[in-house]
């Protein structure tokens, strides 16, 4: 049976079961996404104040077979938060459910509601002298519910894991409107199937996460950063292995930066200070969080010396102050902004087995240049094997002019990644953008099991219709 | 429709589809479990040599509606590997699928088959100058398939996580006989529902794990251990918080040891050298793995001094050699053996929010003593909030004499744990022993979703019938 639109009769019936003002007209921002490629539809926005109201909404939608599109901070990059066509859904925003329910600094845990932004969650941790280490470019807008639903990654995954690794438990409303009470803050709990991990990364298609129990960490005694020039990606990987041998467990981030990133910055963001007289071809940005007793500058200098002696590092800058460290990170964080200003033909969020990264970089460039004269900005989280491999028009051309090669570019990159044992969505998810990719590259047994689970938990198909799995 | 027994006609038909010798008679060891409480049944043991043979077996069982009981190393403590009654199942042993498929030291990853023992997996990592950090008392027998299916824990969870956190991907045969190809060794992969985490901890009820991609870690530059006497569990927790602030990310284990454990050792294992002239009431065993540049003895001495100055530590021993460190761990590891020799009335594998541990210990003892004169040996992985809270007869009595209070003892402990937000199975799982507990204490929405998933993936109910969920 097909879904039905959230029509006036449905909405007025639902409104009567909720506090006044819970349902509202759809502001345009709920129908857009950051890359401006897609336009969503929606009959109304529901802004519940708590899990019981979410349960009322989901139950009503399940009964009436009305679709629900969860919309967290709207920062997703794969269209998971915008439904383009079909019966007009109800959009569900958690922005009024943003409380810190409890914080336990000595247990390194806190319980927050889904509508809290990631930046606010970080601030709450800091206010309790702790850290919540998940760090993303969009953290000012992204909300915890969306961060978990997409299993967000970011720059500190190497040390602290993805969003799922930072979550001890969840509260969620399942597609039948029942409430999953799973906010335990336990480090070990082997009582049945791990529904937390099933809902995390399901992009709202199996239920709505309404609150989460999150892991916190002590603030390191000292922090250090360095921007080191490496001859090539192989050297960067070898340096990573040496850094892990020396400082295993203390490396917060190990980012690869290609020279194109610095060129793009000088092109469209000239106010960002360049670290080197001319952009090196390849750099790594290393960040350490150290315990009592280790000097940050000494730790970096020793690593630099080992890398230089092994021919893995040719130049570099070590941050001797937190201001300098922040400047290195500002540089890294401005690269996506420069990318946006230049306008990619196609952006790829890929991961590879670590050892395959150099070969991929070596092979993908020539394969793409066979399609036309392109510019490639390859950067990302090398410690996780996660590259943001973005393809741009030559200077003077626009992305509209290169629109015809958008699909071929994507195909070349994704085919190669898949053939090398990688993933075509490392951290952004499937959303609606990559449903085709999942069908093309996904394991058939996995896809069949996913469909069986979706049908079992959401038989009417109301939860985020068309995301992850074709409706 | 009920399951059918693996009768001769079924077995001869299956045998014809497999290499000779794949099916064998059931040796008695496949029908027992370590605590000797349960006796299993089984028509035959299947010992396949690879995933394709597992698929043939599962497909045949699915068609014939014959139950399969996966039997890894037989070390499970909750009866997950022994089916006591019902139509005789086929027992599936992975002992002939124990190969190291590949190891990637520079990527800190290896791919092993399900039948490899945990000890062998550790050895393979060491041979490649790496560590696989999961450490359990039963590691010489426990096999990777079972370790993952039960999401095993152990002593190093504080730093490295549970089994699920050490697994990058799995290969598995699903209940319809299809093969899930998920052995990617990626740190980030957000392409659809995380079936890896669904099968891990499902105790063989949703499929059979046949191989896994596992995380490795560099060997620390130095290691250190200390056995510190603390006034009470609260002080132990406060010391943990200080240790994490000083040395966050470097604490491999933080074990609580009650004085009863040392008394038990002197009672039944007098050859184990006692660390103190008389058993202190409470101790912690701390283990560190340190990077280049930190002296292990200095790090421990500094922590000891901080604890002593704060009144959290009253005495202690710091291992100044690896032999001494091994002796501390030997002491810890002999406590379960002493427990076995004395014979518990009831053993409890519980976890609590860290902050609730002292209150639980303070309240549970008096509540139990109302049931009779008992001895309590409370020890475990304090860093994870995971206690092994085991209850014994008074000296001179046998556990058979106290059998009548077994259920009341368990009920007191589990009710209190549940009321305090804890788990009645921290690391051992549900198996068949705790199906009642899961029904009693489990969240209703979680149970309903588990049943829906089980029915969707295993409609005939052939996979480990009666484990986790009632058949």
Image (tube, coloured by chain):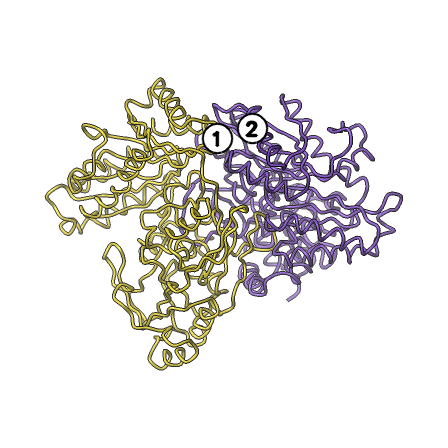
Chain colours: A yellow, B purple
Marks counted in the figure total 2
Q: Residue B344, percent across and down?
A: 79, 46
> Residue beneath label 1, please?
A292
For residue B21, what is the image quadrant?
A: top right
Residue located at (35% from left, 68% from top): A91
Q: Is residue A462 left or right of residue B308?
A: left
Above or below, comparing residue A340 to residue A273 in the picture: below
User: In the drawing, what numbered circle is on residue B302?
Assistant: 2
Which residue appears at 52% of the width and 33% of the height?
A: B250
Q: What is the C-alpha distance between the residues marked 1 and 2?
A: 10 Å
Judging from the image, mark 2 belongs to the subunit labelled B
**How would you rate the neighbour count of disc 1 (Cα within 10 Å): few for under 14, some for 14-19, many for 20 or more?**
some
Q: Residue furthest top?
A: A309
Between A29 and B239, the one nearer to me in the picture: B239
Relative to B55, say whether A182 is above or below.
below
Which quadrant of the figure contains the N terminus of chain B?
A: bottom right
Q: Are marks 1 and 2 in contact (CB under 8 Å)?
A: yes
Q: Residues within 10 Å of mark 2 (few under 14, many from 20)?
A: some
Q: Is residue A417 left or right of residue B363?
A: left
Please determine if labels 1 and 2 lie on a single subunit: no
On the image, the x and y values in percent for residue B131 come to: 54, 31
In the picture, the quarter occupied by the C terminus of chain B is bottom right
The reply to whether residue A197 is visible in this rendering is no
Q: Chain of mark 1?
A: A
The residue lying toward the viewer, choosing from B192 and B56, is B192
**Is residue B196 something that shows in the picture?**
yes
Q: Tell me the SS state at disc 1.
A: loop
Q: Foreground residue, B176 or B53? A: B176
A34 versus B396 height, above or below: below
């Amino acid at each position: 049976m097909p879904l039905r639109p959230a029509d006036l009769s449905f909405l007025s019936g639902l409104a009567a079961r909720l506090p006044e003002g819970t349902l509202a007209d759809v502001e345009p921002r709920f129908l857009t996404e950051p890359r401006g490629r897609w336009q969503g539809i929606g009959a109304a926005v529901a802004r519940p104040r708590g899990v019981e109201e979410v349960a009322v909404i989901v139950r009503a939608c399940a009964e009436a077979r009305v679709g629900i599109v969860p919309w967290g901070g709207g920062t997703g990059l794969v269209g998971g938060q915008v439904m383009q066509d079909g019966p007009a859904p109800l959009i569900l925003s958690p922005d009024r459910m943003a409380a810190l329910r409890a914080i336990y600094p000595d247990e390194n845990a806190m319980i927050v509601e889904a509508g809290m932004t990631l930046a606010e969650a970080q601030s709450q941790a800091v206010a309790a002298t702790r850290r919540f280490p998940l760090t993303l470019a969009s953290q000012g807008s992204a909300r915890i519910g969306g961060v978990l639903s997409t299993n967000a990654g970011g720059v500190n995954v190497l040390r602290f894991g993805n969003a799922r690794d930072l979550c001890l438990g969840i509260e969620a409303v399942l597609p039948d409107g029942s409430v999953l009470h799973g906010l335990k803050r336990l480090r070990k709990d082997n009582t049945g199937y791990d529904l937390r991990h099933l809902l995390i990364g399901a992009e709202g298609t199996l239920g709505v996460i309404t609150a989460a129990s999150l892991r916190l960490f002590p603030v390191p005694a000292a922090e250090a950063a360095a921007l080191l020039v490496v001859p090539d990606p192989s050297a960067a990987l070898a340096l990573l292995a040496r850094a892990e041998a020396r400082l295993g467990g203390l490396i917060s981030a190990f980012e690869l930066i290609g020279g194109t990133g610095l060129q793009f910055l000088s092109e469209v963001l000239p106010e960002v200070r360049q670290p080197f007289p001319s952009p090196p071809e390849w750099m790594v940005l290393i960040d350490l969080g150290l315990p009592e007793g280790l000097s940050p500058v000494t730790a970096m200098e020793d690593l630099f010396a080992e890398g230089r002696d092994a021919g893995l590092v040719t130049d570099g800058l070590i941050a001797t102050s937190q201001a300098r460290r922040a400047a290195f990170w500002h540089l890294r964080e401005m690269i996506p902004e420069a990318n946006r200003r230049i306008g990619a033909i196609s952006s790829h969020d890929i991961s590879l087995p670590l050892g395959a990264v150099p070969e991929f970089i070596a092979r993908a460039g020539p394969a793409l240049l066979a399609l036309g004269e392109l510019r490639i900005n390859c950067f990302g989280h090398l410690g996780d094997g996660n590259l943001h491999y973005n393809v741009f028009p030559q200077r003077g051309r626009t992305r509209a002019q290169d629109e015809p090669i958008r699909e071929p570019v994507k195909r070349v990159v994704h085919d190669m990644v898949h053939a090398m044992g990688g993933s075509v969505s490392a951290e952004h998810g499937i959303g609606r953008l990559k449903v085709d990719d999942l069908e093309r590259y996904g394991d058939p047994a996995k896809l069949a099991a996913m469909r069986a689970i979706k049908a079992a938990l959401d038989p009417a198909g109301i939860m985020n219709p068309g995301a992850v799995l074709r409706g």
